[in-house]
Image: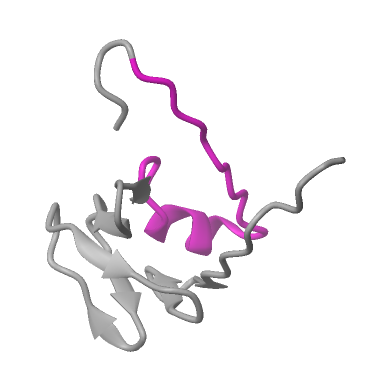
Amino acid sequence: RPKRGQQGCDLVVRCADYASSQRMSRLHLEIRREPTAFLVVDRSRHGTWRNGQRLGVEQPSPLVPGDELDLARVLRMRFVLTLPTRLT
């Protein structure tokens, strides 16, 4: 969650069926960029897994390229980090 005065952006995922949408939390997780790393924070009731290991709720965990995030066993995402190309 962005602190007062900080900007943030949201990624909204709409589930195709009602049962899946009931398992996904409105604010399921947060991916945050720190000066030296990316962190993932589970904010859900139904769980988030990183590479098959369940994350502790509200406990920041390092996120590296190639990590798989499984949201409530409904949606699987892979974290990919690419550096922007420089415009000339």
In the displayed structure, 5 sits above or below 78; it is above
In the displayed structure, 73 sits above or below 83; it is below
Which residue sits furthest right? 88
List x then y, in percent, for residue 5.
32, 11
Q: Report the magenta residues as a range.
A: 6-27
Residue 47 in view of the camera: no
List x then y, in percent, for residue 38.
35, 57
Q: Quadrant of the C terminus?
A: top right
Residue 8 lies in the magenta stretch:
yes
**Left or right relative to 56: residue 71:** right
Instruction: Give me the residue at 44% from left, 28% from top.
Output: 8
Residue 30 in view of the camera: yes
List x then y, in percent, for residue 70.
42, 74
Instruction: Give me the residue at 35% from left, 47% from top.
Output: 32
**Left or right relative to 50: residue 87:** right
Instruction: Give me the residue at 24% from left, 50% from top.
Output: 43
**Left or right relative to 45: residue 11:** right
Instruction: Give me the residue at 24% from left, 85% from top.
Output: 53
List x then y, in percent, for residue 83.
63, 58
**Left or right relative to 25: residue 81:** right
Question: Magenta span: helix, strand or loop, mainly?
Answer: loop
Q: In which quarter of the image is the N terminus?
A: top left
* Colour scheme: one colour
In the displayed structure, 4 sits above or below 77; it is above
**Is 31 or 58 nearer to us in this picture?**
31
**Is 47 or 65 nearer to us in this picture?**
65
Residue 29 lies in the magenta stretch:
no
